[in-house]
Image (cartoon, grey):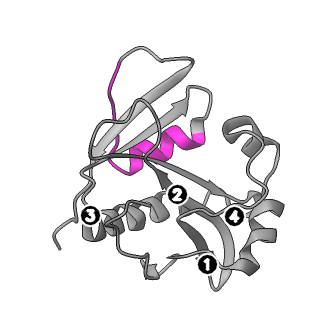
Amino acid sequence: MEADALPLEPMTDGVITIRSPEEADVARLIAGRDEEWRRWLGPGDDDPRPTACITVAGEVVGWVDYETDQDYLRAGEVNIGYNVFVPHRGHGYAARAMALLIKHLARCTSFDTATLLIDLDNSASLGVAARTGFVVQDAAPRDHNLYFKRTIRVEMP
């Protein structure tokens, strides 16, 4: 998390809530990994600490995160990652969580741009990018990935 970022307060859109992870969430975050998760994200950390857990009716159904330590990021940019556990995929939770995280970033940090790096074969994540306002930055994939960006801002009602 950025040094001047405010802590993540629970945020909801009426369907999902994102909240800071708790110690009790670690086992659930690890148990939620499947072969598709490993394909896109690798083996994972033994002590996962994402920015936020995604919950529905109090149950952790996935996570959303941002990072700043990728060499392709410019000043003011963050890269966003997310995962929704198998039984909860296909309900739009990743897009909803990303929208809430972007609101948090707009209100509580100085970041101005969110990025995504998505494998060309990851059709579900490509759909999330399209639904959340990300735009492809280069026509050709890099290492079988597409690079997306969008401005971080709070939408006016």
Q: Amino acid at mark 4?
A: His
Residue at the far left: name it: 156
Q: Residues within 10 Å of mark 4 (few under 14, many from 20)?
A: some
The amino acid beneath tag 3 is Ala
Sequence-wise first label, 1 or 2: 1
> Where does the magenta region start and end?
124-138
Q: Residue furthest bottom?
A: 58
Q: Does dot 2 land on a helix, a strand or a loop?
A: strand
Task: Answer with mark 2 or mark 3, whichever residue precedes in sequence.
Answer: 2
What is the count of numbered marks?
A: 4
Q: Nearer the viewer, mark 3 or mark 1?
A: 3
Mark 2 and mark 3: Cα distance apart in space: 14 Å
Q: Tell me which label, 2 or 4, sits earlier in the chain.
A: 2
Q: Earlier in the sequence, mark 4 or mark 3?
A: 4
CB contact under 8 Å: marks 2 and 3 = no
Distance CA(mark 4)–CA(mark 3): 27 Å
Residue type, label 1: Val
Q: Which residue is mark 3?
A: 106
Q: Name the amino acid, label 2.
A: Asp
Q: Position of residue 51 (x, y in %)?
A: 53, 65
Query: Mark 4 sits on what residue?
Result: 88
Foreground pick, 25 / 13: 25
Instruction: Count neighbours of disc 3 (C-alpha within 10 A) and say few if under 14, some if 14 to 19, many if 20 or more.
Output: some
Q: Residue 15, image x and y in percent?
A: 51, 78
Secondary structure of the residue carrying numbered label 4 = helix
- How far across and down, in percent of the image, does residue 141 sit? 47, 17
Mark 4 vs mark 3: give the one in front.
Answer: 3
- Find residue 65 and name its label: 2
